[in-house]
Structure formats: structure tokens, C-alpha cells
């Protein structure tokens, strides 16, 4: 009887600890005022609900949070596959301005346990519009890769370009955790993409860049890669995606054109893969940045995993010429 009572008391104490609200505070980057108070309250509600839902093993209820329907849908997709929680009861984070006039929080600490018991410590990126409403929640890339992409001394214009590219890369990475095939199919389509604010639209374009014939480019790779992901996603609940490296390079001739090379991989209970993603970005129309080309190149060129893709075979910004 005493043992049972002790267990009940310990459970009640744990439940009381879980029920404690998470207090979020904006650090640097925003003056005191109603907007700052709204952001503090809104993100506090979000983090508290994440913790409550995690410990109760239930779906998120974001009705009390000022958040867009799209952000609710994408965060709910992420939550179904990769639930997480915040182990801190008080979080302070610097707020950044974004290219579209909104705000971004980058370093909100989370904890996540993989099915095998391994504990991970990802950080959340929370995007907010100019009024403090949450518009997107993603996992952040590693801090060392972020610093590599957002280089000090790049100049304001290029810094904005790099932040836009980084935002999209983080959406791309998180799409694997959401098992978001709609996003990935759009990402790897053959048409160009236009980025308007936070909206990505496909459009058919005249050729704006021509891949040099000397570069090895397996034309089937995108469709084959997507077919494999579709099969894997249907069989498993969990997979882990990781970025090994990100490199952003300016085109040597075309001002406002960049190449983004990502060395990445994913692992699941039924499959794993590694390879290189390349994106050709065009900022020459400042109001309408475009992704002209996206390619996937697998690490191995043969089924036996003997012949690896060499550095000279990896597509990069110098692989293209413009008419």
C-alpha cells in the first residue's frame, strides 16, 4: 500500500512539473512595447502547449496561439512524426528581422527521443509576421552550418539573399521530418520556382541556365529518389535527416546568381541514403527570387556502393552558363 501511494505521489509530482508553463522572453532585437509583449505571450503559449501535448501523448491544440492555418497544418504534420518538448521553463532568445518585414527566433532548445532511445537536442526556428503571428515552425540547421552560410561582411544585399536561401533550406530539411511529399515533389520538379514572401510557386520558364554537357547529371535521379522516399515514408513513422555540409557560392559572371550545395543523408528502420542536393538561385529580379534548378545526385554511382561520386562530378554553380 505504501509503495502504491509513493508511486501515485511521484506521478502527481511529475504531472505538476509537466503542467508548469514555459515562459519565453525576447532578448535583443526588439524594443519594449505591445508587439514584444505579444511575441512573448504567443511563443510562451506555443512552447507550453508543446510540452503539455508531449507529456500527455496527444495531438497539439493550438487554438489559444496566434498562428496561421498553414503553420498549424505543417507543425501538426511534424508533430505526428517527430514529437519533441522544451526542457527549459524559461527561454530567452534574440529576435531577428526577416527579408519580408517579419521576425525570426532561431535558438529555442528542444529535446527529442528516437525510437532506439537516443536523445537529440534540436533547436526550433519560429517565424512571425510583422504583427507577431506565428507563420512557420521548423527545425534549425546546426549552428556551425548557419554561421557558414550567413557570413559576416557579405554586405546587406548578399546577407539578405543568404538568409532567404537558408530559410528555404531549413524548410527543405524539415519536410523530411514532416514526411511532406507535396513539398518534396515541388522541390524536385523540373520547372523553376518563384519565392513570393513565404509562398513557393511553380512556373514554366524559358531556359535561364544551361547545364554544361561535361557534367555528369543522371536525369532519372530526381524521380527515382522521390519514388524511394514515397515507399519509405509509407512504411515507417520515423526517419532521421542530417546535413553534413552546406556551401553557398556566387556565380563568377552573373550578378545575383548563387549555387547552394548540400551534402545530406537520411536514415530509417528500412532504408538509408546519402547524396548531394544542388540549387541554382536567381536574385536578379529583386522582388521575385527564383530557384531555377534543383538536382539530386546519389553518393554512389553503382548498386554495389563501390564507385562513389567524386567532387569533380558534383554539380555546382560553375556547371552552368547563361544564354
Image (spheres, grey):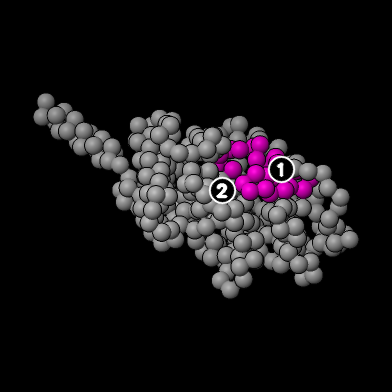
Q: Residues within 10 Å of mark 2 (few under 14, many from 20)?
A: some
Up-down relation of residue 34 to residue 321 (above or below): above
Q: Residue at x 80, y 54 (%)?
A: 217
Q: Which residue is mark 1?
A: 201
Q: Nearer the viewer, residue 171 or 105?
A: 105
Q: Nearer the viewer, residue 159 or 89?
A: 159
Residue at disc 2, secondary structure: strand
Is 179 in the magenta?
A: yes
In this rendering, would 64 be left or right of 257? left
- Numbered label tally: 2
Residue 101 drawn at (x, y percent) = 56, 54
Residue 123 drawn at (x, y percent) = 45, 52
In this rendering, would 245 be left or right of 130? right
Name the outermost residue toward the front.
33
The quadrant of the picture occupied by the N terminus is top left
Q: Which residue is mark 2?
A: 241
Up-down relation of residue 283 to residue 57 (above or below): below
Q: Which mark is residue 43?
A: none
Q: Residue at x 68, y 59 (%)?
A: 260
The span picked out in magenta is 175-201
Q: Residue at x 41, y 43 (%)?
A: 42
The quadrant of the picture occupied by the C terminus is bottom right
Amino acid at each position: 500500500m505504501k509503495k502504491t501511494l509513493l508511486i501515485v505521489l511521484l506521478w502527481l509530482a511529475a504531472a505538476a512539473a509537466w503542467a508548469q508553463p514555459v515562459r519565453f522572453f525576447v532578448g535583443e532585437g526588439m524594443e519594449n512595447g505591445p508587439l514584444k509583449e505579444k511575441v512573448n505571450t504567443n511563443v510562451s503559449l506555443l512552447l507550453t502547449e508543446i510540452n503539455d501535448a508531449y507529456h500527455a501523448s496527444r495531438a497539439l491544440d493550438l487554438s489559444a496561439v496566434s498562428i496561421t492555418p498553414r503553420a498549424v497544418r505543417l507543425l501538426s504534420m511534424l508533430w505526428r512524426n517527430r514529437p519533441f518538448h522544451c526542457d527549459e521553463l524559461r527561454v530567452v532568445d534574440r529576435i531577428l528581422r526577416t527579408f519580408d518585414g517579419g521576425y525570426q527566433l532561431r535558438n529555442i532548445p528542444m529535446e527529442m527521443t528516437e525510437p532506439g532511445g537516443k536523445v537529440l537536442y534540436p533547436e526550433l526556428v519560429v517565424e512571425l509576421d510583422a504583427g507577431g503571428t506565428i507563420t512557420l515552425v521548423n527545425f534549425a540547421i546546426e549552428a556551425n552550418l548557419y554561421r557558414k552560410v550567413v557570413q559576416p561582411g557579405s554586405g546587406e544585399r548578399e546577407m539578405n539573399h543568404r538568409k532567404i536561401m537558408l530559410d528555404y533550406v531549413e524548410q527543405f530539411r524539415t519536410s523530411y521530418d514532416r514526411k511532406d511529399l507535396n513539398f518534396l515533389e515541388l522541390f524536385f520538379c523540373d520547372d523553376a520556382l518563384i519565392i513570393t514572401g513565404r509562398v513557393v510557386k511553380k512556373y514554366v520558364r524559358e531556359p535561364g541556365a544551361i547545364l554544361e554537357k561535361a557534367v555528369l547529371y543522371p536525369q532519372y535521379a530526381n524521380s527515382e529518389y522521390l519514388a524511394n522516399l514515397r515507399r519509405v515514408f509509407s512504411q515507417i513513422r520515423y526517419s532521421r535527416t542530417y546535413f553534413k555540409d552546406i556551401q553557398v557560392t556566387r556565380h563568377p559572371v552573373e550578378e545575383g546568381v548563387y549555387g547552394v550545395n548540400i551534402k545530406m543523408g537520411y536514415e530509417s528502420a528500412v532504408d538509408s541514403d546519402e547524396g548531394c542536393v544542388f540549387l541554382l538561385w536567381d536574385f536578379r529580379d529583386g522582388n521575385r527570387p527564383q530557384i531555377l534548378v534543383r538536382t539530386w545526385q546519389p553518393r554512389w554511382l553503382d548498386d554495389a556502393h563501390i564507385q562513389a561520386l567524386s567532387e569533380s562530378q558534383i554539380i555546382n554553380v560553375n556547371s552552368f552558363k547563361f544564354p
